[in-house]
Amino acid sequence: MSHLPALVADIGGTHARLALASDGGIDTASVLHTRNADWPGFRALVGDYLAGREISAACIAAAGPVTAEGVRLTNGVWHLKPTDIPTDKTHFLNDLQGMAHALGALSGAPGARLVLNIGTGLNAAVRHPAGATALVPPAEAGYARLPLLTTPENAILHKLAKEFGAPVMEAALSGPSLPRLHRALTGQERNAAQITAYWPDATRALYLAVLGAYLGDLALAHLPYGGIWLAGSLGRAVFPLLTCAEFRETFRARGPYEKIMDSFAFHLLDDELAALSGAALYLEQGQAARD
């Protein structure tokens, strides 16, 4: 095994984190947290960070769909390519895959584990245990369709979908979409931080109704008996509200499967380095070699 460290990175639409990793863990002293806007591109960021250091491999968790050409950020301008990194052992994951891999190191019930990240964008991933390793399929779950609720609520969601450009969950649930939802309901201009500081009743009720319907669908699709984790800046703000009736009603409204919905425990993933840790675990567990 090489004694050189690996490069791991978590590249979001707004912020980037890089670190060196070895033996399945990250060197926390090596972590760089920076804004994408401070760099002309991903190659420049990597080059400046490594400053000539050799690496054994790289695992990049990025907020966009992975293709053979790398990752083009969904909510950003960067196109991350294998040629941006000075190693022929570069592996790309969706950033939520990185987070989901990190769930394996947490305590909790056995079984599949789901993480939902609510921030600049919206996405989810599921970790399925597979012996000593895990299967974490990629997903772009933020573009699942909006639910059908009551007629007045559907009218608001239609307005949000038209403004966003598609009738998808990200149009109602992401950080940038929360102010639009609040404005559609109240006519008031507020940023996300102002809204989550006191959660006006109407805004809270509709947001939680949509979130409950969405997480309920994800839960039935994947049966995450190992738990459901919320992550991201807005995920942290929403987590204390998951006991509210507006969320529980749409989450549990599943006919004969209503009792099953009580089997899924909710947790907060309050670790900004989770995607980096997951990328390091991915490399260490040898999953990259099997792709």
Image (cartoon, grey):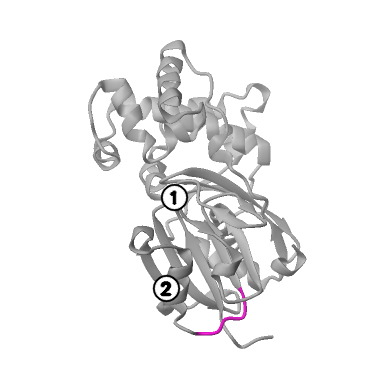
For the record, the magenta segment spans 53-57
Where in the figure is residue 64, as x and y percent of width and height? 54, 50
Tell me if residue 74 is in the magenta stretch: no
> With 29 as the anchor, is 73 left or right in this view?
right
Instruction: Assess disc 1: are there few (<14), some (14-19) or many (≥20) residues with their C-alpha within 10 Å of its C-alpha.
Output: some
Amino acid type indicated by mark 2: Val
Residue annotated with mark 2: 31
Where in the figure is residue 109, as x and y percent of width and height? 62, 53
Q: Quadrant of the N terminus?
A: bottom right
**Circle 1 SS class:** loop
Residue at the extreme top: 151
Residue at 35% in and 58% down: 37
Identify the main secondary structure in magenta.
loop
Q: Is residue 135 above or below residue 44?
A: above
Q: Is residue 96 above or below residue 55?
A: above
Residue at 58% in and 36% down: 262
Residue at 43% in and 30% down: 164
Where in the figure is residue 16, as x and y percent of width and height? 42, 62
Q: Nearer the viewer, residue 273 or 32?
A: 32
